[in-house]
Amino acid sequence: MRIDVVTIFPAFFDVLEVSLLGRARDAGILDVRVHDLRDFTHDRHRTVDDTPYGGGAGMVMKPEPWGQALDAIAADATEPIRFVFPSPAGAVFTQAAARSWAASGEHLVFGCGRYEGIDERVFSYAATLGEVSLTSIGDYVLNGGEVAAMAMIEAVGRLIPGVVGNPESLIEESHEDGLLEYPSFTKPAAWRGYDVPDVLLSGHHGRVADWRREQQIERTRARRPDLLPD
Ligand code: ADE
């Protein structure tokens, strides 16, 4: 899968070198390329922002460098592109979106805004080159799209076949079946006065499965009732 990132802080993405995603890159399963938006400027100060029309606080990212960056990526693309612009004003990212993007065969391009945002016309222009998703990772405000893009790259990347060693671990997981994950335990069976539930030591697969399902429903009811049907 091909993923491009456009940012004024390429160093945020150095962590893609480590862990599972780093291995997937080395194995050629994920092809992630990070571009510095300032490389698409032409003035001495490599300016990427300006004051907002209509006034107001903060600066807005100028459309011209974005246009050039998106053109350069699109010119080099061999698959249909989905442009993802992380934004607290976007639709909330979910496991369903991660699954859909991972299965789509699309080339994902993350456009990371800073300051008060990106000139709105960039989204209209991007829509002439591919699909556009303005996506929030939750109802809180970050300083820019980089951390949100990293979260989405990890959520999508790990669903690409070959990235996670044991595909079964992808299935038995929070959100995959609409419920939170059941609690997990490992040895020792007794630790600092806390015991592992007896059912897990019973060796009875049916009872273990029933108990895990009950725990999933119980936890979801307690922590995330919004995930349960009415
Ligand atoms: N940029 C700033 N806050 C964000 C959020 N919550 N999600 C995605 N992008 C953001």
Image (spheres, grey):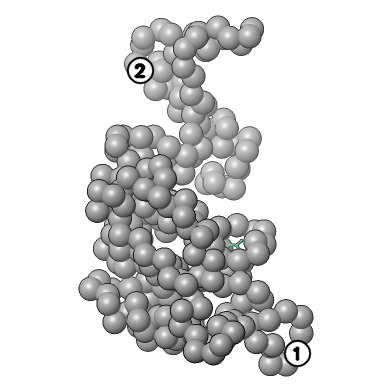
Measure the alpha-carbon separation of dots 1 and 2. 64 Å
Q: Nearer the viewer, mark 1 or mark 2?
A: 1
As shown in the figure, which amino acid type bears the numbered disc 2? Gly
As shown in the figure, which amino acid type bears the numbered disc 1? Gly
Residue that lies at the very extreme toward the front in this rendered image: 44
Mark 1 closeness class: few <14, some 14–19, many ≥20 residues within 10 Å:
few
Mark 2, secondary structure of its residue: helix
Residue under the point 56% across and 87% down: 44
Instruction: Note whether residue 203 is visible.
Output: yes
- Residue at the spot of label 2: 206
Q: Is residue 74 left or right of residue 187?
A: left
Sequence order check: which comes first, mark 1 or mark 2?
1
Residue under the point 30% across and 34% down: 166
In the image, residue 98 above or below residue 185: below
Residue under the point 57% across and 68% down: 87
Instruction: Note whether residue 119 is visible.
Output: no
Name the image quarter holding the N terminus. bottom left
Q: 12 or 59: nearer the eye? A: 12
Tell me, for residue 35, which label it has, or none. none
Q: Position of residue 130 (x, y in %)?
A: 35, 78
Q: What is the quadrant of residue 119 in the picture?
A: bottom right
Q: 11 or 149: nearer the eye? A: 11
Q: Position of residue 143 (x, y in %)?
A: 65, 64
In the image, residue 220 above or below residue 93: above
Residue under the point 23% across and 73% down: 78
Mark 2 closeness class: few <14, some 14–19, many ≥20 residues within 10 Å:
few
Q: Position of residue 152 (x, y in %)?
A: 46, 56
- Residue at the spot of label 1: 55
* Ligand 1 located in image quadrant: bottom right
Q: Is residue 115 left or right of residue 206?
A: right
Q: 109 or 69: nearer the eye? A: 69
